[in-house]
Image: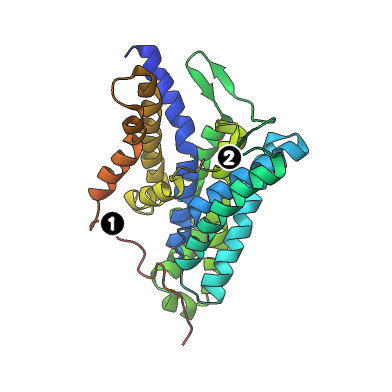
Amino acid sequence: MDVGSILSILITSLMAMVPIVLTSVGAAWSERAGVVSIGYEGVLLMSAFFGGIMAELTGNAVMGLVGGILTGIVFGILHGVLTVYLKGDHVIPGIGINLLAMGVVPFGILAYWGTAGQHQMAVTMWHWHTKYGDLSPMVFITILIAVVTWWVLFKTPLGLRVRAVGENPEAADALGISVEKYRFWSTVYGHALAGLGGAFMSVDWLGVVQKTMSGGRGFIALANMVFSGWNPLISLIGGWLFGFFDALATWLAPQHIIPGQFIRMLPYIMTLIIVAGIIGKARPPKADGKPYKRE
């Protein structure tokens, strides 16, 4: 492996980390407020689909990203209403979102574009072109979002209130903090970032809408959130690690050193190894996933 190959893998890994990091950061904020969602896989897939439609309707890739955010917001509102205001189970709505996406996207691609399984995007984001690969401005936006989210969560009164409703909602309520309001909008924010990550895949990174394009990234993002200790800043490290092994697998595949199917498993195997190493050590917020009912 020469220097050019190493630089190419590093650039590709930065692109591959974006949807993981955005979803992990959003999930960390949501769970810091006490709301669990396992529906990010479906949100990534649905936002990639609707973001692609928005981009082609407007002829603008940035509007495609906005379409992805709006898709995430819709699912965040749905999840927030069910879990925060109706005091429902936190896991079941996420399962529903994932199953919905598995049906809507394959059908939608065929119904809207008339192609089975995938559609090549006619509108995509501009990139900085280098001889080692393309780099999207979304890489730097993602890093900025992670840093700002960490700063707000741990260094501001707003973040303190968010963490309070996730750790001890009874005490927060006694101090006059609206548990429902903070939990609801934290859920919306978390899903909106996942929506941005999904649209990034279709209108920026991959330039295609495919029925399986989320590829388990929603679940990988949740694993990364646990790996990071619910810390948006550390999520950057875990997201980049997944992106690195994803890029490495892409580089190794044409080398025919080992069968391609096993190579494509590499980022997921490494995720399992990393998560297995922290099982039992990770400590989620105390009220995470527990509906709050005022006595």
Q: CA distance from mark 1 to mark 2?
A: 38 Å
N-term mark: 1 or 2: 2
Assign a secondary structure to mark 1.
loop
In the picture, measured across the screen, residue 41 lies left or right of residue 288, that is: right
| Residue under numbered circle 1 | 282
Query: Type of residue at label 2?
Result: Gly
What's under tag 1, amino acid-wise? Ala
- Up the image or down, 47 lies above or below 172; here it is above
Q: Residue at x 37, y 44 (%)?
A: 234
- Judge depth for marks 1 and 2 and give the one in front: 2
Furthest-right residue in this view = 58
Q: Which mark is residue 117?
A: 2
The picture places residue 14, in percent across and down from the top left corner, at 45, 31
Colour mode of the rendering: rainbow
Identify the residue at horizontal 38%, vertical 16% (top origin). 5
- Please give the count of numbered marks on the rendered protein: 2
Q: Secondary structure at mark 2?
A: loop
x, y percent for residue 225? 39, 51
Residue 217 in the figure: left or right of residue 248: right
Query: On screen, 161 above or below 273?
Result: below
Does residue 66 show up? no
In this picture, residue 169 sits left or right of residue 75: left
Camera-nearest residue between 193 and 206: 206
Task: Check residue 165 in the rendering and tell me which mark sits there, or answer none.
Answer: none
Label 2 environment density (alpha carbons within 10 Å; few <14, some 14–19, many ≥20): some
Residue 52 appears anywhere in the view = yes
Q: Is residue 150 above or below residue 139?
A: below
Quarter of the image for residue 116 reads: top right
Report x, y in % for residue 224.
37, 47
Which percent across, then down, holds residue 168? Answer: 40, 73
